[in-house]
Amino acid sequence: MDINANTSNLVFQNLLAEFDKGVQAAEPIMDSLWEQVPSTSNANVYSWLKHIPGFKEWFKGQPRVIRNVESTQFTVANRKFEDTISISTDEVEDNQLGQYNGIAKGMGSEGMLLKDELTAELLNGAFTTALTYDGLTICNAAHKAGLSTINNAATAALSSTSFETAIATIENYKYKADKYSEAKPLTKMMKLTLIVPPALRPTAENIVNVQRLASGADNYLYKRADLLVCPYFSNATQWFLVNIGAPNKPFFIQERKKLEFRELNPQNSDQSLMFDEFIYAGKCRLAALPTHFWLIYGSTGV
């Protein structure tokens, strides 16, 4: 291919088409865990309600009871991500562009799967670094919902028994919003997903996907939760049970700038002249955050 004023744009259009193919082909596996929310600045501020008082019976002749609802400021900054490739003008001249089609397609897929990676990053740090709006780690024994303490952290290895415990724990979360309130359940709607690393797949399969046990008895835990095997987990023993049936998902993805593919230099740019190459890049801005800690139950497995 001869290098001329239109060469860079021709290469860009070809790579952009492959990039878009990658975007369309990408299939996130964790999208049931998160809800996408808009972002219009460098950070989102979430004034999460620390508790919801709920309705109380109101009798004729009684005045309303005005209850103060505490809120907290949870600021989540957007993060910028990029993936950039360079193509030598020699390769363009020698018609060696075919090898870059797969690269551009992969860039598109990787960009779309970034939301999965960010969600998994929060779960990877659920016991150590990833914080919720109350300043505590996602899985912690000291969370507060109103006047109630919520413990969503465990240490048991994954088994039928520990899985049952996890279900019972989520089902029985209750909160007393304030002194005017009766204790109410936090879990009013429930649809569960069991999330495990690849190393725990066989154990998890036996717990929720096997209908009949080796003994011949029915498996009463069969289909009590959907199974999600997460390849992004960095710990081989950690596992989580999450409730995706509540009005809010366990995680939000705030997207400031959608994934895009750009040509960073025209034909006669300094980059092209000095380094004899063309530059093409993907870019996006977004962040992930946990919502309500009582939607997530986690165990270190040790």
Image (cartoon, rainbow, N blue to C red):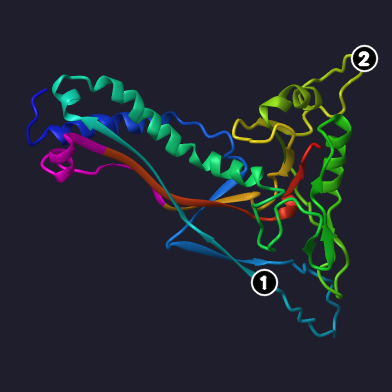
Kind of residue sitting beneath label 2: Ser
Q: Secondary structure at mark 2?
A: loop
Left or right: residue 119 compared with residue 198: left
Question: Disc 1 marks which residue?
Answer: 71
Q: Which residues are magenta?
A: 257-279
**In the rendered image of this protein, does residue 35 appear above or below residue 58?**
above
Is residue 23 at all visible to an observer of this figure? no
**In the rendered image of this protein, does residue 235 appear above or below residue 73?**
above
Question: Disc 2 marks which residue?
Answer: 215
**In the rendered image of this protein, does residue 238 appear above or below residue 207?**
below
Q: How many marks?
A: 2
Between 195 and 55, which is closer to the camera in this rendering? 195
Position of the C terminus, as image quadrant, is top right
Position of the N terminus, as image quadrant, is top left
Residue in the picture at 92% in, 14% down: 215
Q: Secondary structure at mark 1?
A: strand
Q: Give the percent coordinates (x, y) of residue 75.
A: 56, 64
Between 166 and 93, which is closer to the camera in this rendering? 93
Is residue 33 at all visible to an observer of this figure? yes
